């Protein structure tokens, strides 16, 4: 959720990321999302007079690609089970 002063908050946990022991990571994710809100505002995706509910998919991966190696990703669908 994003309130009318552009402060984001979670309405529930992130799929496959326990809130136990990950409070700093949750806080950092909110910081990144907050930095992105001006872009959402420019696209008129935020309600200026009230809070806005947005459904987002949080995904992070770590790849270690050594010199001379290549990586080819695959398209896949996110957000199949998340609902607010």
Image (cartoon, helix red, strand yellow):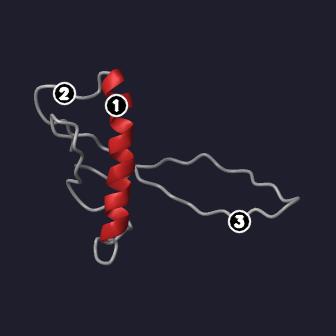
In the foreground, 58 or 40: 40
The residue that mark 2 highlights is: 47
Asked whether disc 3 touches disc 1, contact meaning CB atoms under 8 Å apart, the reply is no
The answer to whether residue 1 is left or right of residue 79 is left
Seen at 51% across and 58% down, the residue is 60
Seen at 15% across and 34% down, the residue is 4
Mark 2 and mark 1: Cα distance apart in space: 12 Å
The residue that mark 1 highlights is: 38
Asked whether disc 2 touches disc 1, contact meaning CB atoms under 8 Å apart, the reply is no
Image quarter where the N terminus lies is: top left
Q: Earlier in the sequence, mark 3 or mark 1?
A: 1
The residue that mark 3 highlights is: 64
Relative to 60, does residue 41 appear above or below in the rendering?
above
Mark 3 and mark 1: Cα distance apart in space: 32 Å
Seen at 30% across and 69% down, the residue is 23
- Residue 56 appears in which quarter of the rendering? top left
Q: Residues within 10 Å of mark 1 (few under 14, many from 20)?
A: some
Mark 2 and mark 3: Cα distance apart in space: 40 Å
Q: Earlier in the sequence, mark 2 or mark 3?
A: 2
Q: Position of residue 43 (x, y in %)?
A: 35, 22
| Residue 36 seen in render | yes
Q: Position of residue 29 (x, y in %)?
A: 37, 55
**Residue lying furthest bottom in this view?**
21
Seen at 29% across and 21% down, the residue is 44
Q: Earlier in the sequence, mark 2 or mark 1?
A: 1
Q: Residues within 10 Å of mark 2 (few under 14, many from 20)?
A: some
Q: Position of residue 11 (x, y in %)?
A: 20, 53
């Amino acid at each position: 959720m994003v309130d009318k002063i552009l402060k984001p908050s979670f309405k529930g946990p992130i799929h496959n990321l326990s809130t136990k022991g990950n409070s700093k990571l949750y806080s950092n994710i909110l910081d990144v999302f907050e930095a992105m809100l001006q872009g959402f505002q420019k696209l008129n995706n935020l309600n200026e007079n009230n809070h806005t509910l947005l459904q987002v998919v949080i995904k992070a991966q770590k790849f270690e690609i050594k010199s001379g190696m290549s990586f080819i990703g695959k398209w896949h669908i996110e957000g199949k089970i998340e609902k607010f």
